[in-house]
Amino acid sequence: MTLAASTPQPHLDTGDTAWLLAATALVLLMTPGLALFYGGMVRTKSVLNMLMMSFVSIALVTVVWLVCGYSLAFGGDVADGLIGGLDHAGMAGVGPGSLHGTVPTALFATFQLTFAIITAALISGAIADRAKFGAWLVFVPVWTLLVYVPVAHWVWGPGGWIAHGLGALDFAGGLPVEITSGASGLALCLVLGPRLGFKKDAMRPHNLPMVMLGAGLLWFGWFGFNAGSAMGADGLAAAAFLNTLAAGCTGLLGWLLVEHRRDGHPTTLGAASGAVAGLVAITPSCGTVSLIGALVVGLAAGAVCSYAVSWKFKLNYDDSLDVVGVHLVGGIIGTLLIGLFAVRAMTGGAEGLLYGGGLAPLGRQLLAVAAVAVYAFSMTYGLGRLLDRVTGLRASEEQEHTGLDLTVHAETAYDHGVLGHGAPAGASPVVSSAQKVRSQA
């Protein structure tokens, strides 16, 4: 009598679970880190508004994700690789005993939620200083459902057409996170138009130490972003972790080298931006390229993105905090270079052009980049135009001139900045009830 081979049953791995718990917390921390990064880059009159746009994204995206976003992104495919079903709407079937591989499904869903959160928050940098906060509250949940969720399904969902049909590679989110946020940021800043004084007034970062702190928190959280995407505490996670560190370093150095040659001054803003550019580019490729490949990916992103951020002045689109120049361009670089530098030792099979894989892998990566960029841009542009018609998307000229902190939130980040940033002479500062209570305590 012959015994049939038993099928391995899914089992909980406590090591994988512990690592993914930590990685999830790291990725969530990236959004407050982004808030500081962006907050330091704007002028004093809009610091709090910038922070709020990131923090409110945490709440808005979480609600959408729990209601139906997770199910549509990671539920069973219902439309030839385009979207998932509603079998997990309201997190149905995601109980304590449900597993995704070797980790609880609830943990996997939460990990993926943190990606969705920061992707929406990234877009805010393109429209800083001039967007209505109320319109942002509407835009974020609708955009998450219309843009992020479908692309996440294409790349990571069961049966998604980019991963399973096309065969393009994206380890940790170059397509769903970086390219969607960059293309969407470009669309929105075109809908809104440039800030008052764009290309005329100096719009320097008001707090570079805050920018550096934000960049440091982003870098710290990025280890969870990339190494956590291995879904286990294993060698692949370790390799992705090291690649992330390496690319961030060469991205920083590449940007500074360009600054030094072009401007004669390596800057702190350049160092922070270069590190982020390298981290953006290594996101899709950290689990597919060797350490040498990671060093090249970071260096290429740091150098190219340092030039790309100036394109807005030549092409006349006001991408306030360089979301297009860093996230769109960096995401494209990292995703395309997989087609050159992918190695079998990391991918388990696929190889890039430089390792004997031919031109086909590069072609697949290029098609995936084009499809996601066009989809994200067109959907966001249409959504932005619709919101602008219905609710108005841009703050009034008076609000923009005075500053969104005071006119929208009735607060200021700095006491000495209540007046002096466009407020009419003799105007009384607006003080919120919360500030009154605190001042009397």
Image (spheres, rainbow, N blue to C red):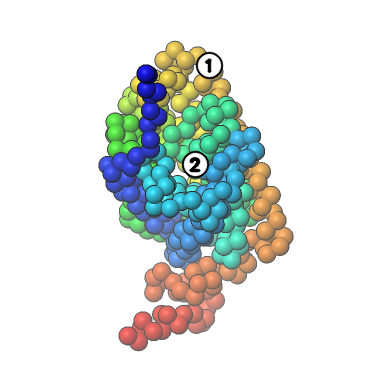
Label 2 crowd bin: few (<14), some (14–19), many (20+), radius 10 Å: many
Residue at x 62% of width, y 49% of height: 146
User: Of marks 2 and 1, which one's residue comes earlier in the chain?
Assistant: 2
Quarter-wise, where is residue 267 in the image?
top left
Q: What kind of residue is marked 2?
A: Glu
Q: Position of residue 379 (x, y in %)?
A: 65, 46
Vertical comparison of 182 with 53: above or below = above
Q: Position of residue 102 (x, y in %)?
A: 36, 40
In the picture, the disc for residue 257 is: none
Instruction: Point out the residue furthest to the left here.
Output: 15
Q: Which residue is mark 1?
A: 359
Quarter-wise, where is residue 338 in the image?
top left
Q: Position of residue 49 (x, y in %)?
A: 49, 64
Q: Is residue 207 in view?
A: yes
Q: What kind of residue is marked 1?
A: Leu
In the picture, the disc for residue 178 is: 2
Residue at x 39% of width, y 84% of height: 437
Q: Is residue 248 in view?
A: no
- CB contact under 8 Å: marks 2 and 1: no
Which image quarter holds the N terminus? top left
Residue at x 55% of width, y 53% of height: 89
Residue at x 53% of width, y 56% of height: 90
Label 1 crowd bin: few (<14), some (14–19), many (20+), radius 10 Å: few
